[in-house]
Every structure is written in structure tokens, then in C-alpha cells.
Image: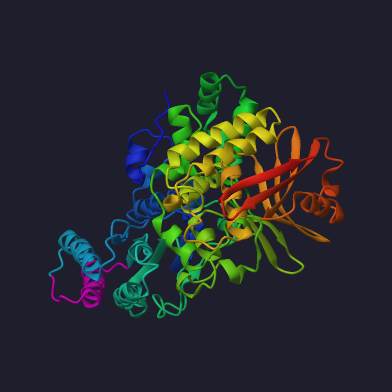
Amino acid sequence: MVNYPIGIQTFDKIREGGYLYVDKTKYIYEVTHPGQYVFLSRPRRFGKSLLTSTLEAYFSGRKDLFKGLAIEKLEKEWKQYPVLHFDLSDIKKGTVEDFEDSVNSSLASMEETYGVVKTADNLATRFKELVERIYKRTGKQVVVLIDEYDAPLLTVLHDPERLEKMRTALQSFYSPIKKLDPYLRFVFITGITKFSQLSIFSQLNNLKNISMKPQYAAICGITQKELEDNFQEGIRALGEENEMTSEQVLAKLARTYDGYHFAHKSPGVYNPFSLLSAMDNCDFDNYWFSTGTPTFLVNMLKHFHADITKIDGSEAFATDFDQPTENMQSILPLFYQSGYITIKSYDPIIDRYTLGYPNEEVKVGLMRILVPYYVHTNTLEAGNTVVQMYLALRKDDMDGCLKAMQEFLTTIPYQENTLKDAPTTEGHFTAMLYVMFSLLNVYVESQVRNAKGRLDILIKTDTSIYVMELKMNGDLDKALRQIDEKDYTIPYQSDGRKVVKVAINFSTEDRTLKAWKIE
């Protein structure tokens, strides 16, 4: 039996407990030689805390824990340093008081560990004096590790007043770091969102951001090679449990959990939490989304009036999505840094990236979260409708699929209809259909461009390609003619699958699919 470290974020517990460990220690050596001030952004549940714990074990001189790992051959000295490890992941009440109470508790524990007497109440002063006194007492430079630095901010990201108060508190706490330079060997800061040199870390102008550096693209997460080298037993067990060959298991794992890219030259990276959970449970499921509901994400979607149909396939420069969260002008930075979209391709000539959902788990999980906001608050009924739609599409019965959706939308009481407070526009209608069809786990695109216009919705199944034109209180025959006149079907004629034209009319009065034609 393989012991999978589900939710275990402590390096020594994994190594001493005989849990499976995918060796990332070559990155530990590289990032610490000679690196001094380093920042890494990765999505939640991506191994940032384990990486931070591994750094703590390394700087604590725990050579015994690294036996047989890559760093054992790289490190010759194994010097021991005092380590101050701050974990801000549980500070989620959104108040400065909660932040101060948590950090004060951490400082008190560190003072006790290193025999330092508290001499100040101010957090910044207390932190500064702790580092200086440890250095004077031990004669060794100090290592500072700050895990999930932005957790206190994410809770209040949509609340400008509370966000500013929290940002000021964090900036004040981190401000001594630059002045402590002679006493520090290494500083490592992790989080989900990108830091801003203009605010929280304004003093740390030498902080090195490795988040999009190709050489560190796989510092967290699991690559295809690491999967095949370390998970043979899990792959075999998944195959036996689900009656699949090893090749089928690998293909399913890749579709479901792979696909993250954190640089323009980056191997595909699997979400480690989901992959380990699938191995441990011998089942393919949406594990990442089950660990937390990203309410802040929904709030920011509303704040930016984001068009959910245009996020997948977005084209942007790095400065458009890898930018400070508090300065962002669209939803892209938050979506990218939180792991809901990732780099899909890169054009070096114009220095432009294409972004999209990394895998099926993320896309389907996100659509489920958005159902109450775009379709109906009764997610159970929506789920039942999706099953009916799926069963119809499996038989290439688009008519039956649309009938199921029509019946569902017709039964929604007016006061529960998502359109009651939304403009009755084709855009909202398109978003509603986009969410529902995406839940079918089929290939769905919206606003697909060609030389003559934009196709509303494109759906690909194993056997058919559906080219959809949507109208509000419109003419179905005119919609079908538009598909022909703008050559929407031409790119798919040589695909081999049946190409089907679908015109759909949505009634703003009845707030449902009124009629459709299929050719």
C-alpha cells in the first residue's frame, strides 16, 4: 500500500511517516543559492506550504530527512540557521485585530524558542528586535519564511475600505525586512496573488519574483514524468478499480488534472492535491473544488462585470494577468493567479499569451459554482437537467437536449430567475447556455472568431460539431442564414465529425428558449 500525503504539508512528517514524496529538492538548492529575497505565487492546494516546510527543514540542518533526495548530492555544508516560519493561511476573518492576534501568537512562540524576551507591543518593532537578538545570541543569520502572505487580503478583496486597512497592517509588519538585511540569510514569501512593489512590499525592491520563471515552472505540482516515475502503483490501482488500461488512466488523469503552465516555456503540471486524492480514492473526482468555495472569486466577477464566456481563450500580455491584484483592471489576474485559468500558448513575436482553463476539473467545477448566478439557485434541479441534456447529446439528439433545458427554464419561478435582475441581453443568455453546456463536460467555446464575424457557441462531442447562433426575440431562418453567410461551419467541414447548424431563439417575455431549428 502506498501512503499518499493527502493534506499533509509538513516535510518531516512526510519523510518520517513513510509517505510518498515527489522529489523537489533540486529546486530548494537552486532557489537558495545565492537567493536571498524570493517570492512565489501559486494557486491554493498546489504545494506551497510543503515547499515552505521543506525550506524550513533544509535551513534547520535536518540532513537526515533528505537522504536519497537530489539535494543530498548538491549540498556539501548543511549549515544550520535560526528559522522564523509565519503561516498566515488561517487569518480569514478580514479584520486587522485577527491578523495582529495571530502574528503576536507566532512571535510569542518564536521568542520562547530562541530565549528572547518581548520588549515591544508594536508588531513591526517586535519582529525587528526578535531577528536582531537571535542574530546576536547565535551569531547566525536568520531565515524568514512567510506562507500564504495574502490570505488576510483575499477575504476583503471586494471591500476597498477593509482591504486598505489590512494592506496597511501587512505593510507595516513587513517593513523591517529590508532594514534587517545584514541579519538575514534568506527570505521566502508565498501566496496566491501577486505582490505589489507599490504597497505591501514597497520597501523590498530587491524581492525576486520567480512565479513565471521557466526554470521554476515545476517547483510546485507534478509533471508527467514525475507522475509516471512515482505513481505506478496508483495508476495500476486506478485501472483495476475503473476497468481501464494504464494508457486510458493516464489519458483521463491528464484531461482531468493536468494542464497548468506557469511560464512561456513550461511543462504541463498536475494539481498535486487532486492527483494524490484520485490515487488515494481510486476515483476520478473534482477534489480541488471540494476543499473550498471561492466566494471572493464570485464577488470579483460581479465587481468587474466579467463576461464568463470570454475568459477561456483570452489573449493578453503578461502585464495584463501577472500584475498586482489591487491594481488589476479586469478579472484575468485573479483568475490566473488563483489557478482557474493558465497559460495555454505563447507568441514570442508579439510577446502575447493565450489563457484558458487548465483541465476538466477546473472548468466543470467553476461552472457548477456559477450555476446559481447564471441559471438557477436550485443547483439540484440544474444538475438533473444537465444529466438529461447529456444523455440526449450522447445520442446526437440536440433537439432533446434543448427540450430538457427549455422545460427546466420554464419551471423557474420569476423571483428565482437569474434574469430578473439582469439585463435581458443576448450576452446573459449566451452565458447561461455556456454554463449549462460546459457542465456536460463537452468541448464548448463562445464568441468564436473568424474573418466575417463571431460565432455565438461552438460545441464538440465525439461524433458531432454544433455551430450555434443565438437570437433574442429573433428570426430562426435569419439566424441559420447568418451561419452560412459568415462561413461559420467551413473550418469544421474536414474534421470528420458531423457538422450541425443550430439556431435558437430566446424569449425575453417568457424568459426561456422559445424555439429552435436544427439543420
Residue 12 sits in which quadrant? top left
In front: 151, or 329?
Answer: 329
Q: Is residue 398 above or below residue 26?
A: above
* Side (left or right) of 308 relative to 59: right
Whether residue 317 appears in this view of the structure is: yes
Report the quarter where the C terminus lies.
Answer: top right
Q: Position of residue 309 (x, y in %)?
A: 61, 56
In front: 56, or 302?
Answer: 302
Q: Is residue 326 above or below residue 238?
A: below
Q: Is residue 248 above or below residue 204?
A: above
Magenta stretch, overall SS: helix
Report the quarter where the N terminus lies.
Answer: top left
Q: Position of residue 76 (x, y in %)?
A: 45, 53
Q: Which residues are magenta?
A: 118-141
In front: 158, or 90?
Answer: 158
Residue 251 sits in which quadrant? top right
In front: 477, or 19?
Answer: 477
Q: How is the image coloured?
A: rainbow
The answer to whether residue 128 is magenta is yes
Q: Residue at x 46, y 77 (%)?
A: 197
Q: Residue at x 49, y 51 (%)?
A: 370
Q: Is residue 369 above or below residue 108?
A: above
Whether residue 21 appears in this view of the structure is: no
* Side (left or right) of 122 relative to 329: left
